[in-house]
Image: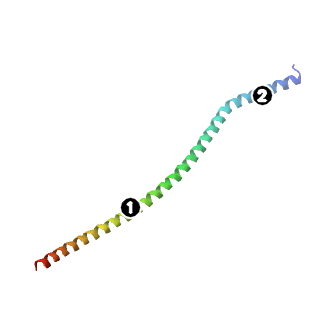
Amino acid sequence: MKPKHQIISHMINQLRLTSEKKYKKILPHTVERLLWQDEITEMKRKLRIMSHQIDQLKEEIQAKEALLVKEHLDHQRVEKEKETLKTELQKMKQLAGTLVVD
């Protein structure tokens, strides 16, 4: 029969080997998980930045659309005014033509 300290030493070695095997299996997965977590964190950061940029672009589009509508209304007003002035000019020319003939 083996002495008690040899049995204990053998058990300790078996536990150590079992632990090493377990950690050797777990470690790559843990490292991989940490790398994925870093990548996910980075992707979330980029998503927040892009979301903020999208919001800014939406605001710019809204401002430009409002300006475009204003410019369109101004253009319509000027065109209407131009037509009114053309009509007035025609009337004045006709009036001037009738005054010269008389």
Hey, which quadrant is residue 66 in on the image? bottom left
User: What's the residue type where badge 1 is placed?
Assistant: Leu
What is the crowding at mark 1: few (fewer than 14 residues within 10 Å), some, or many (at least 20)? few
Three-letter amino acid code of the residue under disc 2 = Arg
Q: Which residue is mark 2?
A: 16
Q: Which is more foreground, mark 2 or mark 1?
A: 1
Instruction: Say what secondary structure mark 2 lies in.
Output: helix
Q: Quadrant of the N terminus?
A: top right
Q: Position of residue 102 (x, y in %)?
A: 10, 80
Q: Nearer the viewer, residue 91 or 24?
A: 91
Residue 84's place in the image compared with 39, above or below, is below
Q: Foreground: 56 or 45? A: 56
Q: Percent position (x, y) of residue 74?
A: 35, 66
Which residue was labeled with disc 1?
68
In the visual, does 28 lie left or right of 2?
Answer: left
Mark 2 vs 1, N-terminal side: 2
Viewer-closest of 16 and 51:
51
Q: Is residue 99 above or below residue 64?
A: below
